[in-house]
Amino acid sequence: MEAFEPSILRATNTARGAGRRSWFWWAAALGLAALALVSGSARRCGPAGAEAVFLDDLEYRALTFFIDHTDAATGLTRDRAPADGSASKAPASIAASGFALTAWCIGADRGWLGRDEALRRTLTTLRFADESAARERGWFYHFIDVSTGKRHWRCEASTIDTALFLQGAVLAREYFDDVAVSALVDRIYARVDWRWALDGGSTLRHGWNPERGFLASRWDSYSELMGLYLLGLGAPAAGLPAESWSAWSRRTVAVQGRHAFISCPPLFTHQYSHAWFDFRGVHDGIADYWQNSVDVTLAQREWCASLTSRFSRWSPEMWGITASDSADGYIDWGGPNNSGERLDGTLVPCAPAGSLPFAPRECLAALQAMRDAGGAALWGRYGFADAFNPQNGWVARDVIAIDVGISLLMAENLRSGFVWKHFMRAPEVRRGMTLAGFVAHDDRKPFVSTVLARARSAEYRRALVPMFERDAKVAETCAGRGQEELPGRPAEAMAELAERWARPLSERAWRRMARDQWGTVRRNAS
């Protein structure tokens, strides 16, 4: 302790004794801080009783959407449909069809769909995708005609939407273990030209269209991109180079309460890769992406609850926004790191539904509160309508396939880990995770993300330096007056600050940070 005492506390014998007493408070505070940080880990729950019945109902209604709005002849799934169950006029989306492939497997495993029926539906989709669906260099177009498979709306050949389809296809291959399914999936996967989509860069383009060529945007910062890159790394032929995994940025970090996390505003971006890839218990040396999504989910809940002065119906039990329909059209609602200026009180059920495995208790409470608040206008044939506004009674007319899909997959992963268990067996998936550098956590040497550690360090510096400076000034004053006692810093203040963080720093980091703070005080005092 003596080595860390600031020189200003050595002015007199009186101040020296007081300084030691002050440091006792700091040491106690740090101990309480560590306890507070460890207690911030994600909570787990195994749904049972009424919660299990609710999730059964949610999943079955979601499966009903895919049954109702997948074309019998082509196996393509429409992008959206009226929530009341009436006919849809929307085109198919390749991403929706990938969610449908996964839905057939869940339905068969749950006994809601006969295995032969699920296999037949899967083969229909895969055969049409292999033979007739519009694509460019193996990349499927985002929207396609549900009957012909031709490009719709002059849309792009989409890298991310093709990845969502491939994830559903690989899951179906691993689940059914059927020769015909395996041959189709292998052929579709091998046809994708990953290097072409790099377009001479280190990161993938968002897409390509015949009129303009490659889209300007790249998948170059943290978002729903992880599944796309991991599939590319593990590809059976001409895959992505290993360095592409580290080529995209994780530098955007946000803070909400005690949660610090790599940020991308819409909540779905923290969910989609996790629907198939199991990131529990692993890290890539840069981040723990599972814990990141846990923190993002809990941060959004806290953030929504903090806005009750604007939206009186929002609360810790009524929360959740992500990209969705609204009274003013489709909006990519952001999260805690956004100003929130576009918010109008709309809530989106697939936001907590897609985060069910990350924060089961909180997300289940939100979903049940939404169902109770919205009643029959919100909860219908396919489960929740896409969005609603409890402030004014507005409810979306439609459900959106990918929002229904993420709700289904994450509900099932929470309950059984079904998708993870089968998908993670795929050799391409294992190869991709290995090339990306994923390793299991080592309990003997807890992993600390350098990306988040820098953010925490900066936040602590902003918060702690004024405290240290104040105590130093008090010490100097006390020494000058010859006072016997120096007021110590209450431990509770430090513990309160520690509550802002979900994970602890290592002991070495704590000591280094304390040394840095006292160094700053010395320089300012000299």
Image (cartoon, rainbow, N blue to C red):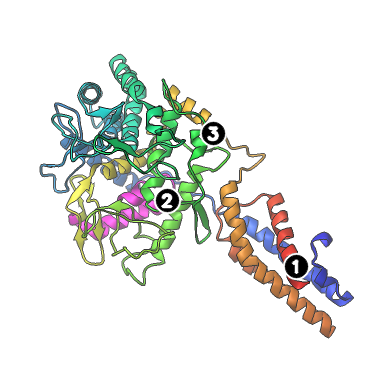
Q: Is residue 473 above or below residue 101?
A: below
Q: CA distance from mark 3 to mark 2?
A: 21 Å
Sequence order check: which comes first, mark 3 or mark 1? 3
Question: Is the Cβ of the residue at disc 3 closer than 8 Å to that at disc 2?
Answer: no
* Image quadrant assignment for residue 411: top left
Q: Is residue 489 above or below residue 166?
A: below
Q: Is residue 142 above or below residue 362?
A: above
Q: What amino acid type should be assigned to the residue bearing mark 2?
A: Cys
Q: What is the magenta range?
A: 349-377
Q: Secondary structure at mark 1?
A: helix
How far across and down, in percent of the image, does residue 3 sit?
83, 60
Return the residue nearer the eye: 90 or 113. 90
Q: CA distance from mark 1 to mark 2?
A: 38 Å
> Is residue 359 rendered to the left or right of residue 143?
right
* Image quadrant assignment for residue 410: top left
Q: Secondary structure at mark 2?
A: loop
Looking at this view, name the residue that lies furthest to the top: 179
Q: At x 43% / y 59%, what residue is drawn?
A: 336
> Is residue 231 rendered to the left or right of residue 487?
left
How far across and down, in percent of the image, does residue 272 sit?
37, 41
Question: Is the Cβ of the residue at disc 3 closer than 8 Å to that at disc 1?
Answer: no
Q: At x 42% / y 62%, what residue is drawn?
A: 303
> Is residue 485 rendered to the left or right of residue 39?
right
The residue beneath circle 1 is 523
The residue beneath circle 2 is 264
Q: Secondary structure at mark 3?
A: loop
**Does the magenta segment cover residue 359?**
yes
